[in-house]
Image (cartoon, rainbow, N blue to C red):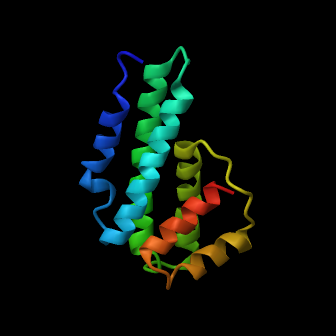
Amino acid sequence: MSETLPLHAAIESILENASLTADLDDEAADALIEWGISCVRKVYLDAAGREDTEDFVYQQMRAIRKMMRAINKWAARRGESDLEQEAAAFEKLLERISKACGCLLPPMTGEQKRAFIEQHHAASPRQTIVDLRNLCQK
């Protein structure tokens, strides 16, 4: 991984990028940053021994940043649009999470997705982020 960004620099790139958490309060931003850093560490573990290490790390870091921006927007703005629009946004969000984290999310029916969305209308952005992360860790 000689040409790849060192792990500490990759983590710094998450910590220093204010656009990843711009719409969140401090508690929610901290939860999202913690999740992002966890994903970065996993990328570097998964990259070890790969022939395409540099490209793999680049693509995954890009996916992590996209995921974080999407979570930032979704967690901060949930409840501002109708349920159908939120369901479509949630579906895209789940795709970004799966790609960035390299995890298979548990299958969710449309009803389960709607329930998750409705449950988080009143939840804090931090709790929403924690619950999204927990989906990925099941």
Question: Which residue is at the front of the view, 10 or 67?
Answer: 10
Q: Is residue 24 visible?
A: no
Question: Which residue is at the front of the view, 113 or 136?
Answer: 136
Q: Quadrant of the N terminus?
A: top left
Which of the 4 image quadrants contains residue 73? bottom left
- 116 shown above or below 51: below
Q: Quadrant of the C terminus?
A: bottom right
Q: Is residue 17 left or right of residue 109?
A: left
- 64 shown above or below 51: below
- 11 shown above or below 20: above
Q: Is residue 64 visible?
A: yes
**Residue 19 location in percent, x, y?**
27, 55
**Residue 104 location in percent, x, y?**
68, 48
**Residue 56 location in percent, x, y?**
49, 26
Question: Which residue is at the front of the view, 24 or 40?
Answer: 40
**Residue 33 location in percent, x, y?**
38, 55
Residue at position x 39%, y 68% in the image: 28
- 117 shown above or below 48: below
Residue at position x 44%, y 45% in the image: 64
